[in-house]
Image: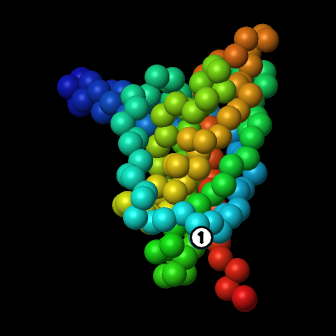
C-alpha cells in the first residue's frame, strides 16, 4: 500500500511539474492588425525569416504595472500566393518585448500558412518591424512576452 501511495505521489508531482513548464506567458492582447496590399514588393526578393534568436525572457507569469504598448505602425505585406489563393486567417505570435522596446524572439502560437512566402513568415516580418514602449515595474522597464494576433483578411466583395 505504501509503495502505491509513493507511486501516486510521484505521478502527481510529475504532472504538476509538466503543467508548470508548459504554461502560456502572461499575455497582453494587442489590437488586431489589418493587411495593407503592397503590389510593388517582388515575391522573388523575399528571404526566409531567421527565427533562431534564443529566448532571453522567462515565459512564465511576469508582473508589471504598465503593459507594453505598440508605438509605431508598419506595412503588413499580404503574400501574393496567399492573396491569389484567397487564404485568410489570423496568425497568433508570441513576441518578446525587450526593455528597450525592440522585439526579441518571435514564436508562432497559431499558424495559418507556414513556409517561405506564407502568412506566418509575413506576420513575423511585420512583428520584427514594430517598436513598443516596454512593460514597466516600479518605473523600470522589463522584458515580457505578449500574445500578438496578426489578421490576414481579404475583401472578397471587390
Q: Residue at x 39, y 28 (%)?
A: 54
Q: Residue at x 63, y 47 (%)?
A: 148
Where does the image place residue 111, in percent across and percent down from the top left? 47, 59
Quadrant placement of the C terminus: bottom right
Which of the 4 image quadrants contains residue 50?
top left
What residue is disc 1 on? 39
The residue lying toward the viewer, choosing from 85 and 137, is 85
Q: Is residue 19 visible?
A: no
Image position of 69 (left or right of 98): right
Where does the image place residue 157, in percent across and percent down from the top left? 72, 89
Q: Is residue 42 visible?
A: yes
- Above or below: residue 108 compared with residue 76: above
Image position of 120 (left or right of 63): left
Where does the image place residue 10, in percent across and percent down from the top left? 29, 27
- Name the residue at the bottom extreme: 157
Secondary structure found at label 1: loop
Q: Residue at x 66, y 64 (%)?
A: 35
- Above or below: residue 137 compared with residue 118: above
Amino acid at each position: 500500500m505504501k509503495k502505491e501511495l509513493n507511486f501516486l505521489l510521484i505521478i502527481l508531482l510529475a504532472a504538476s511539474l509538466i503543467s508548470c513548464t508548459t504554461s502560456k506567458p502572461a499575455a497582453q492582447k494587442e489590437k488586431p492588425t489589418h493587411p495593407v496590399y503592397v503590389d510593388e514588393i517582388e515575391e522573388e526578393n523575399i528571404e526566409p525569416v531567421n527565427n533562431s534568436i534564443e529566448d532571453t525572457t522567462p515565459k512564465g507569469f511576469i508582473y508589471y504595472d504598465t503593459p507594453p504598448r505598440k508605438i509605431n505602425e508598419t506595412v503588413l505585406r499580404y503574400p501574393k500566393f496567399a492573396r491569389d489563393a484567397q487564404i485568410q486567417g489570423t496568425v497568433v505570435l508570441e513576441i518578446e518585448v525587450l526593455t528597450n522596446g525592440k522585439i526579441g524572439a518571435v514564436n508562432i502560437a497559431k499558424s495559418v500558412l507556414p513556409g517561405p512566402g506564407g502568412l506566418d513568415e509575413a506576420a513575423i516580418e511585420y512583428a520584427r518591424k514594430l517598436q513598443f514602449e516596454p512593460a514597466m515595474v516600479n518605473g523600470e522597464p522589463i522584458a515580457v512576452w505578449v500574445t500578438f494576433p496578426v489578421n490576414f483578411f481579404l475583401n472578397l466583395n471587390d
